[in-house]
Amino acid sequence: MEFPFDSSIKRMSVVYKKEEDSTLTIFTKGAVERIIDLCTCVGHGKHQEAMTDELKEQVLDQMNLLADQGLRVLAIARKYSSEDIEEHSEIDRVDIEKDLCLLGLAGLYDPPRVETKSAVQACATAGISVHMLTGDHSLTAAAIAREVGIIPKNIGTFPPDVAAAMVKPAAEFEAMSDAEIDALPTLPLVIARCAPQTKVKMIEALHRRSGFVAMTGDGVNDAPSLQRADVGIAMGLNGSDVAKSASDIVLTDDNFVSIVNAIEEGRRMFENIQKFVLHLLATNVGEVILLVCGLGFQDNLGYSVFPLPPLSILWINMLTSSFPAFGLGKEKAASGVMRRPPHDNKKGIFAWQIIVDMVVYGVAMGACTLTTFVFIVYGPGQDGLGDDCNKAYNASCDVVFRARATVFVELTWMILIAAWEFKSLRRSMFALDPNNTTSRFPFFKDVYENQFLFWSVVLGALSVFPAVYIPGLNTTVFKHKGISWELAIAVVCVIIFVTGIEAWKLVKHNMGWFADAETEGVRNNGGTGRVSLKQGIFIIAKAVTRTRREDQSAHEKEKVKSKCNEPSARIKEEV
């Protein structure tokens, strides 16, 4: 029969029966401090002796030595019994797991994946705190946590209260009240010998500190905490069905790095949605300003003259600006996306930077196009709004139709160029990648990187020429006509618009406006209880392994050397 592992008592047992004499052999393994309390003796055969307090201290010292090297330590005990127990009978395990004899300790090293340390470092720089809740011993958990960088190697340099709060046994953490936990300078980064309720209590503590919690787990006992977390993540390969059903996400590769990659992808999508929304709304603001102000232009018959006819607006919104907006949705993640703190979930997509940029860029578009329309209609040469130019072309509408064509070209180009500018909300369009050190002018490389966006802008810019210059299509459909010197005005205004955007980005950077969107790393502000940690690596286990290999290698060399002094026949015989 088998008594399965129970997280509350930290042990499991199996019972075997010999067919010859029907004697029972009970093997028990589990947490060292739990097993030795059930043992009355230690050793095997002639080396067996009674368990004493002094022996218990020696066993615990040996356990600490192994655990301090990052090994998971199990105690293994055995007992012989002549009781008559039926197979799979409902016998109390307490009656079986007593009066054991300790055989020894087993130290198991389960090395973390090579990429885990870099993933934990990425989380730290992204403002994401990684906490490890495990059933291992405190020393084992702390050693593994140091190896992957969850806790710093130089923990002694922190204030005593902070260092003491980083690693806690579950018994101590569970004994604390909510007020005592909230008073800690930082929540424990490592909690050892965890029970299911310990993880739930930790999640509640994180929630009280306004944390957004993602919990990973694979066992049946993890189901309550997976449900309580904001995002439950179960292991797909080694996870239990209960854990998978209780979680929101299932990792198919059981790799922590996949979680970090998902965070990076989520941030990329969030920023791209912001760029998409900014592009469309800034365009609409510019068009609204142009059209609303255009109501003030009245012709000789008292009708308001449209600076842009309805079909031109539909053409811009549906064909010209839509594809660049879609292209912004295909932007890759910015190089510094994982060096920024998490965004404020309450603000969502419409952060203040998006709202202000929408107004600034929209006003700039509207002002430039409106100025162009006024300059052509009332500037040098023939002027006037003509007679009833909204319906059809006549001789008096020549100036209005030319002004409309210029505004159409100018607004289209502004919207297209703005898509390149919105690849970054704060960096210049001419230096989008802060890590680029190979090129002094990387503009063409940066804009061509997203080929969908690049060709959307290029083809959209060329599409204005058929609409402006094809006879019949221009005057009858779009209510404008071909232009000549007016193209220079459109080009100049586009340059002014781009210069204005670059100046606005520079002002935002120099004045520190909306700087929270670019803050890198984890900020150490005691108000949130978040502590900035330097990543460390624990190498004792690797050093021990290396020393053993060196000793073994030296032994082999000595053995070969001694054999070289033997007769050749003896060497051939052994070979």
Image (cartoon, rainbow, N blue to C red):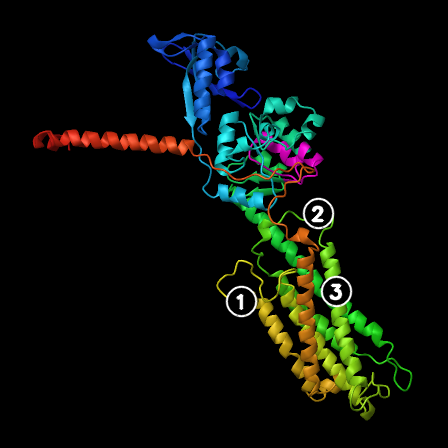
* Amino acid type of the residue tagged 1 in the rendering: Pro
Which residue bears the numbered disc 1?
Answer: 442
Which residue bears the numbered disc 3?
Answer: 360
User: How far across and down, in percent of the image, does residue 201 sit?
Assistant: 66, 29
Identity of the residue drawn at 50% across and 12% down: 38
Q: Is residue 145 left or right of residue 374?
A: left
Mark 2: secondary structure: loop
User: How far across and down, in percent of the image, does residue 334 sit?
Assistant: 58, 57
Q: Is residue 460 magenta?
A: no
User: How far across and down, in percent of the image, does residue 204 sit?
Assistant: 68, 32
Q: Mark 1 or mark 2: which comes first in sequence?
A: 2
Q: Is residue 64 above or below residue 329?
A: above
Q: Mark 3 or mark 1: which comes first in sequence?
A: 3
Determine crowd level at label 3: few under 14, some 14-19, many 20+ residues with C-alpha closer than 10 A: some
Q: Nearer the viewer, residue 244 or 272?
A: 272
Q: Nearer the viewer, residue 179 or 285?
A: 179
**Count of picture labels:** 3
Q: Mark 2 or mark 3: which comes first in sequence?
A: 2
Q: Nearer the viewer, residue 76 or 274?
A: 274
Q: Is residue 349 above or below residue 101?
A: below
Q: Is residue 264 above or below residue 376?
A: above
Q: Nearer the viewer, mark 1 or mark 2?
A: 1
Say if residue 143 shows up in the picture.
Answer: yes
CA distance separating discs 1 and 2: 34 Å
Determine crowd level at label 1: few under 14, some 14-19, many 20+ residues with C-alpha closer than 10 A: some
Mark 1: secondary structure: loop
Quarter of the view holding residue 320: bottom right
The boundaries of the magenta stretch are 205-231
Which residue bears the numbered disc 2?
Answer: 345
* Amino acid type of the residue tagged 2 in the rendering: Asn
Mark 3: secondary structure: helix
